[in-house]
Image: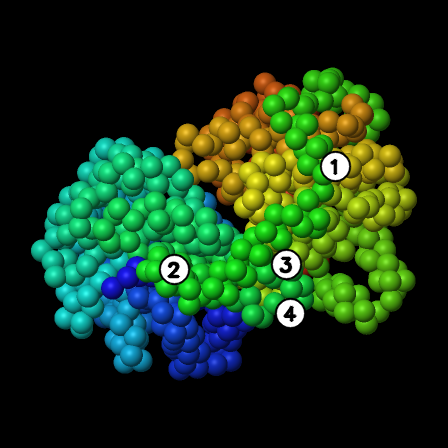
Amino acid sequence: MGTQSHIAGYPRMGPKRELKFALESFWDGKSSAEDLQKVSADLRSSIWKQMSDAGTKYIPSNTFTYYDHVLDTTAMLGAVPPRYGWNGGEIGFDVFFSMARGNASVPAMEMTKWFDTNYHFIVPELGPEVNFSYSSHKAINEYKEAKALGVDTVPVLVGPVSYLLLSKPAKGVEKTFSLLSLLDKILPVYKEVISELKAAGASWIQLDEPTLVMDLDSHKLKAFTEAYSELESTLSGLNVLVETYFADIPAEAFKTLTSLKGVTAYGLDLVRGTKTLDLVKAEFPKGKYLFAGVVDGRNIWANDLSSSLSTLESLESTDKLVVSTSCSLLHTAVDLVNETKLDDEIKSWLAFAAQKVVEVNALAKALAGKKDELQQFFSANAAAQASRKSSPRVNNEAVQKAAAGLKGSEHRRATNVSARLDAQQKKLNLPILPTTTIGSFPQTVELRRVRREYKAKKISEEEYIKAIKEEIKKVVELQEELDIDVLVHGEPERNDMVEYFGEQLSGFAFTVNGWVQSYGSRCVKPPIIYGDVSRPKPMTVYWSSAAQSMTSRPMKGMLTGPVTILNWSFVRNDQPRFETCYQIALAIKDEVEDLEKAGINVIQIDEAALREGLPLRKSEQAFYLEWAVHSFRITNIGVQDTTQIHTHMCYSNFNDIIHSIIDMDADVITIENSRSDEKLLSVFREGVKYGAGIGPGVYDIHSPRIPSTEEIADRINKMLAVLEKNILWVNPDCGLKTRKYPEVKPALQAMVAAAKALRTQL
Ligand code: GLN
Ligand code: ZN
């Protein structure tokens, strides 16, 4: 038999985002449902074929989706919230996409991050009155579809307990309802689905229960035991894989997992779960399969095959070993073959989903004693690993030294925030309730064209600079006209807040097609950090000084912070994340100091994604927060007291990390607020104690709606009830990049008018 191979899941978008374009064209009414189904079926069949050609034994089905696999499960269970007007029967595109995206009369269901990834799922809303019924036959249809193509697949379902743990209680029952009490109601549907799959010939099934890696109390763990006992008779006759991923599995959960009734195989993430390996070695149930996730589904690096082989060899005492991916490949890019702009050396260091399938199979073959057949593959891999280790493109001794020097010590500005604010006020002379914006102004079609043509060398540098300067001038004049106090240049030169910096820092590479699904048809293309990071030359000083020269008001310099750059990139795996973060921090520090030298007295360092990097397990959070916050502080330890450091964060649920936010020691913090006033109260109170300026967004920029002066004044008044007037800033929720000028102008007008009206009353 030999060792076998398994892939836990695969990207849906296609190597060139075929699904994205098919979906968007269907949504725009430009193509039919059949067109969309055809594109999707082609994608599925090519994936199955590719996996089967590579020799994969356990090939997943039902990991494709038109939007989101959790929403698929909601459809399977018939758990459609009543407002979508579904009347039973098989759920079609209409109801499905209404839940996903909203329709003319009803907004979409809530979306949230899938664990600590950048993938967002549609959160099931469950209340006591939901009538669960088997309402989407997608899993069985996909199984049969693959079978008709000659591929016997492992159907994948979101496991019942994780499904409930990822749900939220429906409106009205938030405080009183126990989601797990619904287990009894959803299991009958799972039984129907599983029985049908069995009847159609499935011999394996994969149930994803990633919540098992979280900090679960015993009550929740018990739900797993109960659910699988209940399913046992239905599962009998099948091989059942329960797949976990994204972190070390806690010892208690491992015990629960390995004692689940009806389960014959366990999928474990051995990339993020280094301690999991010890658990397995200490005790693994006899006769069961271990699906060892050694190929990283979360990153784009080629596997170190010889190191994986030794890990796998150390596990050979478990009788049934299957080589697998650490999680679904959903979170990595699709196919390296389409990367035309990366040079061969960097390419040799990388593996996207398609290449990872090959790696998994190569490892399985090698373990089965057939390494000789793959001599070339293994030696090419070893050579690439060696070149990555020693390449001068990766290693920059000066940077390594500087970053190493930061470890262990506490860097912070010498003066406390209140004294700094006093010194800054003497220089800036701002009114109370100062107004500002978060950075970007609307990006017009014309502006995007200019950037594109400059990149494609269709217009000269001179023409480009002229166009951007004109845009800055327009934005500066508008802000003066609106009478905003602290201005921004509007970020017209930036396509993206991370890419812009990545392109100018050394150690970064960019792909052409390295897209990863973020939600629905939306994808992101993270930069790849492959080497030690340094800043060859100033990145923003030219534009910020140009902008400052156009006005006598303070111009805010605008930078992306190190933690956000890190969290929105594919990060190197050959050194700890914090080390890479410190390197970026030092590069940003140089930029901050150059801005200061150029006469910029207010500098905003965005940390939009600081919270995103928070590890799943509580035990690891303190360490992350410590180095993340330290990295932020490092960027501005070199400035004078009179230079005002702002930071901005795109979220408002800080309650659990408020002390870390304070520890960032920024002079002014602007945060998203428009959707959650209440939650912020505690943050505000801490803010009062701390003394820094705080700018909770006074209106929602995510909506085209234009707020009135009264409405904004009302919000500010509510904030003033908890906050001292001399620390409150008035600003929108986030950057204005995605809005249009006809929305932005009146909204900012209302904002300034509200601030002015309140000033006279204070
Ligand atoms: N300065 C950035 C902007 O205004 C911040 C964006 C963000 O927080 N996501 O666009
Ligand atoms: Zn923001």
**Viewer-closest of 14 and 286:** 286
Q: Amino acid at mark 3?
A: Ile
Looking at the rendered image, the disc whose residue lies closer to the viewer, 2 or 1, is 2
Mark 3 packing: few (<14 Cα in 10 Å), some, or many (20+)? some
Q: Tell me the distance, in whole angstroms, between the alpha carbons under discs 2 and 4.
A: 31 Å
Residue 558: image quadrant is top right
Query: Which badge, 2 or 4, comes first in the chain's sequence?
Result: 4
Residue 366, label in figure: 2
State whether residue 723 is above or below residue 21: above
Q: Tell me the distance, in whole angstroms, between the alpha carbons under discs 3 and 1.
A: 22 Å
Query: Which badge, 3 or 1, comes first in the chain's sequence?
Result: 3
Q: Amino acid at mark 1?
A: Ala
> Residue under circle 3?
346
Marks 2 and 3: CB-CB under 8 Å? Answer: no
Q: Residue at x 47, y 64 (%)?
A: 375
Residue at disc 2, secondary structure: helix
Q: Residue at x 73, y 17 (%)?
A: 415
Looking at the rendered image, the disc whose residue lies closer to the viewer, 4 or 3, is 3
Left or right, residue 154 beside residue 481: left
State whether residue 42 is above or below residue 451: below
Query: Which badge, 4 or 3, comes first in the chain's sequence?
Result: 4
Q: Position of residue 707 (x, y in %)?
A: 60, 48
Label 3 beta carbon within 8 A of ligand 1? no
**Viewer-closest of 317 and 749:** 317
> Residue under circle 1?
398
Residue at disc 4, secondary structure: loop
Residue at disc 3, secondary structure: helix
Marks 3 and 1: CB-CB under 8 Å? Answer: no
Mark 1 packing: few (<14 Cα in 10 Å), some, or many (20+)? few
> Residue under circle 4?
340
